């Protein structure tokens, strides 16, 4: 593993005993841009004068997932004490709403391949699932599972339309979906494109 480019770049392999870190380090995140990290607590903290972090769960290095993160959403349970946020977590875990978190722990966010009425696409786990409040209400406005979308587990690709400007023809190719949920790995490496033939290849959800 290559080391950090500078003394202020976050290095997950560094320990305070072998190589003390600066008070704060930074890392470039593919979705959130730059993250500021407290080197002592390993908490992601706000950057003064910068935009707030995205309001969706972020995938963080394992070291940062081992501590509560009050300033960024991550894959985990939401913790609040006396109206003070201890861990922002993910709203989908409320009321046992996320089967991925229940079975595998904080591995997300991950992608899922879903289908409804013959249309296949990929979505983030927090768009497919939703938490449930004590009053029985969804914790988010986007909840494809409740809207009748089924999770397909017999493939790792989705159809993608490709337009050729020269021939003006449109073709369909199968494109691999990155960052899939862990159960796609356990279902075997040989996947076939196309619609599933049996209910065993779908994950059903009831409203």
Image: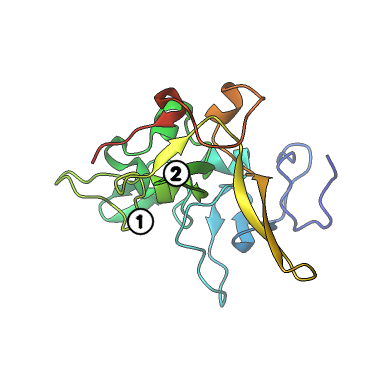
In front of the other: 142 or 23:
142
> Residue shown at 40%/26% (left/top)?
199
Q: Earlier in the sequence, mark 2 or mark 1?
A: 2
Q: Position of residue 87 (x, y in %)?
A: 41, 48
Q: Where is residue 51 in the image (x, y as percent from the top left)?
A: 53, 73
> Residue shown at 56%/37% (left/top)?
194
Q: Is residue 102 left or right of residue 82?
A: right
Which quadrant of the structure image shows residue 163?
Answer: bottom right
Residue 68 seen anywhere in this rendered image of the structure: no
> Residue shown at 61%/27% (left/top)?
185
Q: Residue beneath label 2, please? A: 115
Q: Closer to us: mark 2 or mark 1?
A: 2
Q: In this view, does 105 lie above or below 162?
A: above
Q: Is residue 99 above or below residue 94?
A: above
Q: Is residue 123 left or right of residue 177?
A: left
Quadrant in which the N terminus is drawn: top right
> Residue shown at 33%/46% (left/top)?
130
Q: Is residue 138 above or below residue 186?
A: below
Q: Position of residue 120 (x, y in %)?
A: 50, 47
Q: Where is residue 68 in the image (x, y as percent from the top left)?
A: 46, 44
User: SS class of the residue under badge 1?
Assistant: loop
Q: Is residue 5 above or below residue 189?
A: below
Q: Distance between the residues labelled 2 and 1?
A: 16 Å
Q: Residue beneath label 1, please? A: 142
């Amino acid at each position: 593993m290559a080391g950090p480019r500078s003394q202020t770049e976050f290095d997950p392999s560094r320990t305070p005993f072998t190589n003390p870190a600066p008070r704060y380090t930074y890392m470039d995140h593919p979705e959130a841009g730059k993250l500021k990290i407290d080197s002592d607590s390993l908490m992601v903290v706000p950057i003064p004068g910068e935009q707030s972090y995205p309001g969706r769960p972020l995938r963080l290095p394992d070291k940062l997932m081992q501590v509560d993160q009050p300033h960024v959403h991550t894959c985990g349970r939401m913790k609040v004490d006396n109206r003070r946020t201890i861990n922002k977590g993910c709203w989908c875990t409320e009321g046992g709403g996320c089967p991925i978190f229940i079975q595998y722990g904080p591995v997300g966010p991950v992608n899922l391949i879903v289908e409804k009425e013959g249309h296949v696409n990929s979505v983030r786990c927090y768009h497919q699932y939703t938490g449930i409040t004590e009053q029985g209400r969804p914790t988010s406005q986007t909840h494809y599972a409740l809207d009748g979308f089924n999770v397909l587990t017999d493939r790792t690709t989705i159809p993608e339309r490709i337009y050729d400007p020269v021939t003006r023809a449109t073709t369909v190719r199968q494109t691999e979906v990155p960052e899939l949920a862990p159960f796609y790995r356990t279902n075997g490496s040989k996947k076939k494109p196309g619609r599933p033939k049996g209910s065993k290849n779908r994950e059903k959800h009831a409203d």
